[in-house]
Image: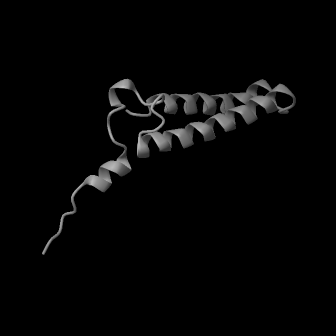
Amino acid sequence: MRSVGLTAVSLWAISAILALPLLDPNLTGAGMHVLVGAVGTILAALLCEASVVLFNFPKIVVPPHMRADRGVLAALRERPERRTC
């Protein structure tokens, strides 16, 4: 839920990559620029999505109602360990 917007951006870029061979089979000119831009968008969105899920950062990408929450790593660090003796 925390990174649904970034997932939507990634899926848009993936759909652009899948539709690209139908529009420009030789990948020349503008087609190559779209391909490079889509791959860059996917990589940036995946990196930002991992940052949002693990650290809840950057706050501008996190939904407003979840900005006060901790990330997954902070929540795991603060959980008391269960010891069986």
3 left or right of 85 in image: right
Image quarter for residue 52? top left
Could you tell me residue 2's position as x and y percent?
39, 34
Q: Nearer the viewer, residue 20 or 49?
A: 49
Q: How is the image coloured?
A: one colour
46 left or right of 81 in image: right
Q: Nearer the viewer, residue 70 or 33?
A: 70
Q: Residue at x 87, y 31 (%)?
A: 28
Could you tell me residue 37's position as x and y percent?
72, 32
Q: Residue at x 75, y 29 (%)?
A: 34
Q: Nearer the viewer, residue 49 or 11?
A: 49
Q: Where 83 falls versus 4 (above or below)?
A: below
Q: Where 84 falls versus 40 (above or below)?
A: below
Quarter of the figure with the N terminus: top left
Q: Nearer the viewer, residue 54 or 35?
A: 54
Q: Residue at x 55, y 41 (%)?
A: 46
Could you tell me residue 6's position as x and y percent?
51, 32
79 left or right of 20 in image: left
Could you tell me residue 55's position as x and y percent?
42, 44
Total marks in image = 0
